[in-house]
Amino acid sequence: TSTPPPHLDFRAFVDALRSDDDLADINAEVDPNLEVAAVTRRAYELQSKAPLFHNIKGAHDGLFRILGASGGLSSDPQFPYRRLVRHVGLSPNASLGDFIDKMLSAKGKPGIPPVHVETGPCKENKLFGNDIDLTKLPAPLLNKADGGNYIQTMGINIVQHPTKAWVNWSIARAMVLDKTRMVGLIMKPQHIARIYAQWMESGKDMPFAIALGAPPIAVMASSMPLPEGVTESEYVGALCGEPLELVKCETNDLYVPARSEIVIEGTVSITERAKEGPFGEMHGYSFLDEELMEPIYNVAAITYRSGNAILPISVPGRATGPDETHTLIGTLASAEIRQLLQENGLPVLNVFTPYETQVIWAAVQVDRKKLWELETNAEEFCRKIGQLVFRRKCGMQIHRLLIVGDDIDPFNFKDVIWSYASRCRPGMDEYHFEDVAAYPLVPYMSHGPGAKLTGGKVVANCLLPHEYKQEQMWVTCDFENGYPEEIKERVLRRWSDFGL
Ligand SMILES: Cc1cc2c3c(c1C)C(C)(C)C[C@H]1C[C@@H](c4ccccc4)[C@]4(C(=O)NC(=O)N=C4N2C[C@H](O)[C@H](O)[C@H](O)COP(=O)(O)O)N31
Ligand SMILES: [K+]
Ligand SMILES: [Mn+2]
């Protein structure tokens, strides 16, 4: 069979990065104890090529190579989002707006259920029972403060509701605990936690599978807060217009993408917990007192591709050069927030979480002409948006919404911060929400002055009062807006002659 396109096959995705000259094949031996992660972290921060480590110290029997920064910005400044949009089959010059449009393009369409195939590349090698020793795998230590080796940061956590009506795909971190066990974060209101709670009620351990090196477009849907009850694999089918191909797990009834690099399967205990973390997280902090007791994953089988399977990793941290917790989590939550606001009839054009705000803030771009028709005002409009976004799961990790006009590009932080700094009057233009669910991983919540789990959210109105009812009463003083077309054309034509 011919190799599927990059958005449906991880290996093809890696080859596409190589043909884009956006991949560094590193054959020198590299240590999974911090060195691999440090290289990856610097690759994000310098927006270098994605590092593919072919020679990991301690790798054996084809387990494993490591790919870092699969969701980082591309190394070509002309196409900064190329690596991202390759996940969803868009052309190299596609924008973040195109990426969001693509991920929302299956809304309202019926899901296309995956098809079950007999076997696939992920079945080429199988480990059971005594052959399994997670402590012998080169699972990377990602940050000097981490509490363990996080083998799972970019795989798809697959769990099924006990009624079998819903199979959820998400990304949730997990670290090696011992020979056959991991421990991983399972936190409300995430769907893995909702389904886990159902298994607890049923009194049975929760079957799981983690598919690492899964089809890139499936990784995107796994990182997207799709509505409760939506089976991500069916949404991906609708996105692609064709069903995903899945194979059955060895030790439970779950199904995984047939072309995955590595599959870890087993059951999550509903009784046993262990200390999880600390973990260098998405806001750029690793708190040394992070004492989480999280559920234990009991590993019953590991299956993997021949030819040296590849483990993708994410090394979260400061978004000086964004990593997957910014480029995937932020952008995909933005998509669902836009969908929510548009479905509620609000004149919202786009939503985006600026990397410079560590994706804790989201800019909401409003069509001002349509806003006039609502005959509303800042207080009423901002409160309505806050009530919608802050009371839904897709808004969980956003703590500040900036309401900006259509003269502002939400993907351009200089635009966003200009309107916030100059049009949002302190003490009068911000509407606070203290009774909504917070995102506890935000440092001023987990280690801040107030309650940890609720509040700390605000909607900032970055529109002047008259923009709610008429044309803006100012000329923006920049080259684009401050001069007639004829002058701008003349200046552009003569620019090089001026020697500027
Ligand atoms: C792309 C990506 C997403 C992540 C994560 C990571 C990466 C790379 C790592 C690197 C492992 C870091 C932590 C960060 C950590 C995290 C925890 C809560 C909120 C945001 C992040 C968490 C996690 O450990 N637990 C969790 O519940 N959700 C996570 N998400 C967000 C979820 O994948 C996202 O929210 C989806 O929508 C879930 O699907 P669902 O809607 O429930 O079907 N991880
Ligand atoms: K998901
Ligand atoms: Mn879900």
Image (cartoon, grey):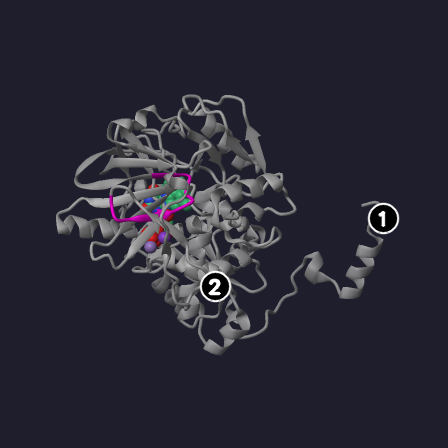
Which residue position is annotated with label 2? 105
Q: Quadrant of residue 227?
A: bottom left
Q: Could you tell which of marks 2 and 1 lies nearer the N-terminus?
A: 2
6 on left or right of 188: right
Residue 370 can be seen, yes or no: yes
- Percent across and percent down for residue 215 are 45, 47
- Percent across and percent down for residue 138 are 39, 26
Q: Amino acid at mark 2?
A: Ser
Residue 256 belongs to magenta span:
yes
Q: Secondary structure at mark 1?
A: loop
Q: Secondary structure at mark 2?
A: loop
Residue 282 can be seen, yes or no: no
Q: CA distance from mark 2 to mark 1?
A: 47 Å
Q: Quadrant of residue 276?
A: top left
Q: Give the number of the mark in front: 2 or 1.
A: 2
Query: Looking at the picture, does residue 67 appear above or below residue 96?
Result: above
Which residue position is annotated with label 1? 498
Say few, some or many: other residues with alpha carbon within 10 Å of mark 1 (under 14 / 14 to 19 / 20 or more): few
144 and 267: which is toward the camera:
267
Residue at figure coordinates x 21%, y 46% from the top left: 206
495 and 179: which is toward the camera:
179
498 on left or right of 162: right
Residue at figure coordinates x 29%, y 52% from the top left: 191
Q: Which range of residues does the magenta coloring cover?
A: 252-263
Query: Looking at the picture, does residue 48 appear above or below residue 217?
Result: above
- Percent across and percent down for residue 472 are 59, 69
Residue at figure coordinates x 53%, y 59% from the top left: 423
| Badge 2 residue CB within 8 Å of ligand 2 | no
